[in-house]
Image (tube, helix red, strand yellow):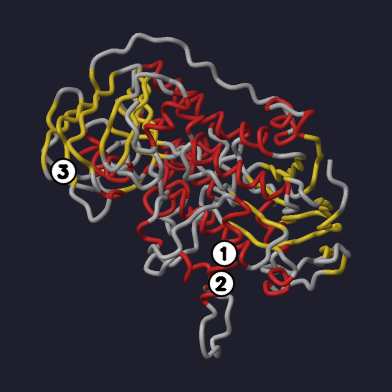
Amino acid sequence: MPQQRVLSLNNLSKRFGSVIANDAVSIDLHRGEVLSLLGENGAGKTTLMNMLFGHYVPDGGSIDVANAAGEMAPLTLGHPQAALDAGIGMVHQHFTLAENLTVLDNILLGGESLFSWRHKRKAARAKVSRIMERTGLDAPLDEQVGMLSVGERQRVEILKALYHDARILVLDEPTAVLTPQEADTLFENIGAMTRDGLSVIFISHKLREVLAFSHRIAVLRHGKKVGEIATADADERVIARMMVGADTPATPRDAMQAGAPVLELQDLSVKGSSARTTLQAANLTIRAHEVVGIAGVSGNGQSALAQVISGLATPSSGVMRVDGKVIDRFTPPNMQTAGIGRIPEDRHHDGVIGAMSVAENLIIERLQDSAVQKRGFLQQKSIRENAETLSKDYDIRGPGIDAEARLLSGGNIQKLILARVFEAGPRLILANQPTRGLDLGAANEVARRLLEARKRGAGILLISEDLDEVLALSDRIIVIHDGQLVEAQTMDREAIGLMMAGEHV
């Protein structure tokens, strides 16, 4: 284990009103080390990194960083430029690149004064070329970023940080939009860089990658560091116990006989301005008692598929049937009447009305129910009783059932949506990124309820960028690439990864 310290977070604390986001957190990072920072949703990981980068000023504690000579010195707090000058770089989960500029221009962006008379492009190109040769991170410097694949853009983000002489690199969910093969290549490249002295803080919810990639693991829970462990001494069960404070057994997926078709798409196409909003002659059948998983890199048509099934987009050609009946009007109310329940990808924009109360959002799709309204008058007592029951059953936490839904955390908004969908007992459940942003315990609860719905006879379409989730829950897997659907004839992770990259296996 490397022993030369390059970063020390010393008793960092941060409070937002009455909420303690970080409580005296201390973490060391060593030269050439990969440290995985884990924790449930809301554990304090983001706040801790925001203090490291100067976006937040700690209420207590200090940060020391090694300079180029290896000497530890205090970091000026609350100043992002100070973090950059100290050699700290970050690659965010969502890319921060200008798509209309070349790779080289993106790498240079922000690194020169606005008052410079000329760009030092020749020297910059030579420096980037040396970095690419040393690290194995290859990118076409004269290509527009908008023309690159997702994996290539990820490399550009890392090259940009290294160009600005980052000695400490923070990777926030770096493989969220990569195929398994692209992720493996990324880890190989970063492994070479750590052998050259780079130190990495790796934030991820994919425990398989954490165990394969890191040297040491630090776990946060409720704002406190609850433990550290050498990766060699850890397994998924140990890490999960550290994260949630108890064992979280996975829900077994029992073998079941698929029933009659619930959803049928026949040569269904959706015209869009990009691959993200396009679907090409899709053929898909989902039966009762069946979970069909859609695996694919983000932006390959998942959005178009979800929108047409939700009634938010009208197909340009083809046929859609639910329980054997042709859908001729693509509107959300018509899909709801047909028996489709949806868990949308964007929970804030499409899942709730933020200005309405938690209780009102829980019944918003049941306005024709006599228990909800009679003769145009809402039945407030019944609505409140429903909200109290579901808040307890689905562990919806927050300021209360009368509070506006926008005041809930992202995880609790997701629980609200799940309660509304599952309690309606739909024939088909569209589960679009159902566990995104949820902690380990909540994600396992979502899986349990999806499998319960499968058992009672629902058909489930699971769209997820987490291939591990798709493999764990699905009876069949469909791969989507450039708006086309191809059924995988295997559950082999590597083979599906190749299909996600556009190779037919």
Pointer 3 with pointer 1, Cβ within 8 A: no
Q: CA distance from mark 1 to mark 2?
A: 6 Å
Q: Find out whether the residues at labels 1 and 2 contact each other: C-beta distance under 8 Å.
A: yes
Q: Which mark is residue 488?
A: none
Amino acid beneath label 1: Val
Query: Image point 46% across, 46% down: which residue?
Result: 359
**In x, y percent, where is residue 332?**
24, 44
Q: Can you say whether 404 is above or below 217 in the image?
A: below
> Regarding mark 2 in the picture, which secondary structure is present there?
helix
Number of marks in the rendered image: 3
Pointer 3 local density, CA inside 10 Å: few below 14, some 14–19, many at least 20: many
Q: Position of residue 258 (x, y in %)?
A: 32, 13
Amino acid type of the residue tagged 3 in the rendering: Pro
Whole-number angstrom distance, CA of label 3 to CA of label 1: 45 Å
Residue on which disc 1 sits: 128
Return the disc, 3 or 1, that comes first in the chain's sequence: 1
Q: Nearer the viewer, residue 282 or 438?
A: 282
The answer to whether residue 63 is visible is no
Q: Which residue is mark 3?
A: 315
Q: Which residue is mark 2?
A: 124
- Among numbered discs 2 and 3, the one appearing first in the sequence: 2
Frontmost of labels 3 and 1 is 1
Between marks 2 and 3, how big is the CA–CA gap?
A: 48 Å
Looking at the rendered structure, the secondary structure element under dot 1 is: helix
Residue 339 place in picture, x, y as percent: 26, 30
